[in-house]
Image (cartoon, rainbow, N blue to C red):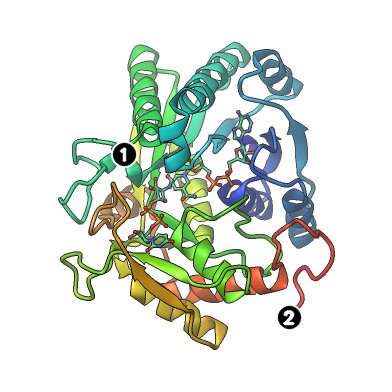
Amino acid sequence: MKVLVTGGAGYIGSHTTLSLVEKGHEVVVLDNLSNSNPEALRRVQEISGKPVQFRRADLLDSDALDAVLAESTFDAVIHFAGLKAVGESVEKPLMYYQNNVAGTLNLLHSMGRAGVYTLVFSSSATVYGESEDVPLRETVPLNAGNPYGRTKEQIEDILSDVAAADPRWRFALLRYFNPAGAHESGLIGEDPQGTPNNLVPFVAQVAVGRREKVSVYGNDYPTPDGTGIRDYIHVMDLAEGHLAALEFLQEKAGVFRWNLGTGKGSSVLEVIRAFGEAAGFPIPHEFVSRRPGDAAVSYADPSAARADLGWSATRDLAKMCEDHWRWQRSNPQGYANAGSAAGQG
Ligand code: NAD
Ligand code: WQD
């Protein structure tokens, strides 16, 4: 298939691009590089030995989208491009609605003009908000608790309405739980700009000496060790989930929602311990107060994806930490010093 991957230079997009080209698909990545480095795509080509075309363009630029979609006949689009920092979305909601919602509207208009009707969308478990109805099934009422989450909820609604109005459209809405890990080459991985918002990249930066210690947000939750429980999923499992969704959409039109999670929860302390085991030394941490808006426990019921897509996660927390650590220790500054120690060891 010929696939346009928006946001393909980013964390999940680069790993999915790698899986796509390794399976023999042709990929064009469209990204404005607002939160990524083109070095990621150079390395995807290095690992796979396959070409990846790159177009630097913004979702908010309709003419640029039209131009890329007119270049060749695409079979499908995988749409990762978006802003994703919860805290920033509270401070700058208009920027989030503009980039994520308006950007997706532009993309849909351009796709319609180009006659491309198949889209796999990066939604998020964040659409479930603080629901305590775990394991979370796709049927739980959505209740995102912040502007970022509401952009995902609104895009899900838009895609549902569009599919209902026109039977040509095929949409897979993939609700990722907590992505972590890296490709096992250690050449590509997560490279957050500034202070990481998420647990695993923060732990990784402590391990590599960029930060002093991990702040554990609360140890008084109603969980076995008092810390929050999440469903961490290996980024390569996620990547493979996208390929499975693409294949499914070749057979069926309509709108489909799937959780991409492992179905297993891990506490903050379990993650810190597992990362320490991967690194070979304990990770310094301290308990601080809860982070507002955090649920105590969140993990997926992934049975719908297993039944419909024949997909399930195969990599566990130890493997996630091992791969994340290989990437981080070989690239202590991420892609910033591209070419220096990448992939060694
Ligand atoms: P990322 O920031 O690494 O990748 C997103 C990419 O989109 C970046 O390369 C960025 O430059 C690009 N982009 C952003 N706005 C753009 C625009 N207007 N035009 C063109 N390109 C643009 O993030 P990620 O972790 O790879 O996440 C990918 C998608 O998955 C996002 O939509 C995110 O909301 C969603 N998601 C992420 C997580 C997570 O924890 N990482 C969890 C659930 C859902
Ligand atoms: C995980 C656990 C924290 C950092 C977020 C977004 C969600 C999705 C995934 C995009 C929680 C604890 C964290 C730290 C800590 N992203 N923690 N110290 O909050 O489940 O989900 O990322 O869609 O939308 O909300 O992930 O990695 O931030 O936190 O103790 O420095 O780690 O309290 O229990 P979260 P996270």
Q: Are marks 2 and 1 in contact (CB under 8 Å)?
A: no
Q: Quadrant of residue 78?
A: top right
- Going by the image, does 64 lie left or right of 294? right
Viewed as shown, does residue 62 lie left or right of 87? Answer: right
Q: Is residue 65 above or below residue 178?
A: above
Image point (48%, 77%), residue name: 275
The one nearer the camera, 206 or 99, is 206
Structural distance between the alpha carbons of marks 2 and 1: 39 Å
Residue furthest right as drawn: 339
Amino acid on which the number 1 mark rests in the picture = Val
| Numbered mark located on residue 24 in the image | none
Q: Is mark 2 within 8 Å of ligand 1?
A: no
| Ligand number 1: quarter of image | top right
Q: Quick one: 187 or 34, which is closer to the camera? A: 34
Residue 65 percent across, percent down from the top left? 67, 20
The image quadrant where one finds the N terminus is: top right
* Percent of width and height locating residue 239: 53, 53
Please tell me which residue is depicted at 61% across the width and 38% down the height of the picture.
7
Judging from the image, what secondary structure is the residue with disc 1 in?
helix
Q: Position of residue 226 (x, y in %)?
A: 22, 71
Q: Quadrant of the C terminus?
A: bottom right
Label at residue 127: 1
Q: Where is residue 323, by image quadrant?
A: bottom right
Mark number for residue 345? Answer: 2
Please report the residue visible at 34 percent of the width from the left and 50 percent of the height from the top.
305
Tell me which amino acid carries mark 2: Gly
Spot occupied by residue 51 in the image (x, y as percentages of width and height): 79, 47
**Residue 162: quadrant of the picture:** top left
